[in-house]
Amino acid sequence: MPKYLACLFLALSSLTQAACPEDKAYPNNMFPELVFETTMGTITVELDRLKAPMTTNHILHLVKNKTYDDTLIHRIVPGFVIQAGAFAADLSEVEACDTVINESGNGLKNSRGSLSMARYNDPHSATASFFINLGDNDNLNPSSDGWGYAVFGYVTAGMDVVDKMAAVKTQYSNELDAKDVPVETIKILSAQVK
């Protein structure tokens, strides 16, 4: 194979994401609990495999692969959301397996303390980034106008930690080319199934 074709092939293959495993992660656990150890305290969440089976399985595989370990809480909008799972502590983008189908029509609401998948305009573009709702964000629920943001779990302990995060000062970050980034770094140190 000519050298330039080999280089092109390598470049293209690096743009494609690996497919996520199809096997069920932690199959005997219908409502798995995750513990996020952060630099500001511990947050425990319960996932809803019954109403968000594909999203829950996707998240569990990411946790199993330690995808969220040493990542940033990279976006905080008081009264709205805190967001994580997009950037590692070294500011590189988090690599996740493939995307997950949007399960926003599952009846779960973007209410205070719920976890939802972050995405681009494409409703099925969610990969690893998620957010915790700081208020009842009905505008993020599905409607006749379009897709919503898929809720897949709820904070069961540590909402005080989430609220503490929501109170920190934020700014525009040149490194991330994003606004609402905490001035002082907040990290998820580890995420594991309880």
Image: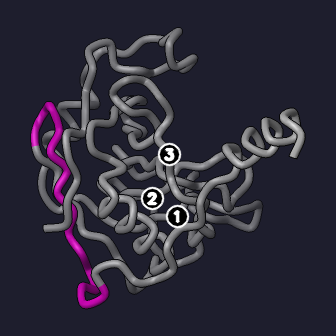
Residue 180 in the image, given as x and y percentages of width and height: 45, 21
Residue 74 in the image, given as x and y percentages of width and height: 40, 29
**Disc 1 on helix, strand or loop?**
loop
Residue 115 in the image, given as x and y percentages of width and height: 38, 57
Residue 97 in the image, given as x and y percentages of width and height: 53, 58
Mark 3 or 1, nearer chain start = 3
Q: Which residue is mark 3?
A: 95
Q: Which residue is mark 2?
A: 110
What range is drawn magenta here?
27-41
- Residue 173 versus residue 180 in the image, above or below: above
- Residue 3 versus residue 157 in the image, above or below: above
Mark 2 or 1, nearer chain start = 2
**Disc 3 on helix, strand or loop?**
loop
Residue sitting at 33 percent across and 36 percent down?
71
| Residue situated in front as seen by the camera: 139 or 187 | 187
User: Mark 2, mark 3: which one is toward the viewer?
Assistant: 3
Q: Which residue is mark 1?
A: 150
Q: What coloring was used for the rendering?
A: one colour
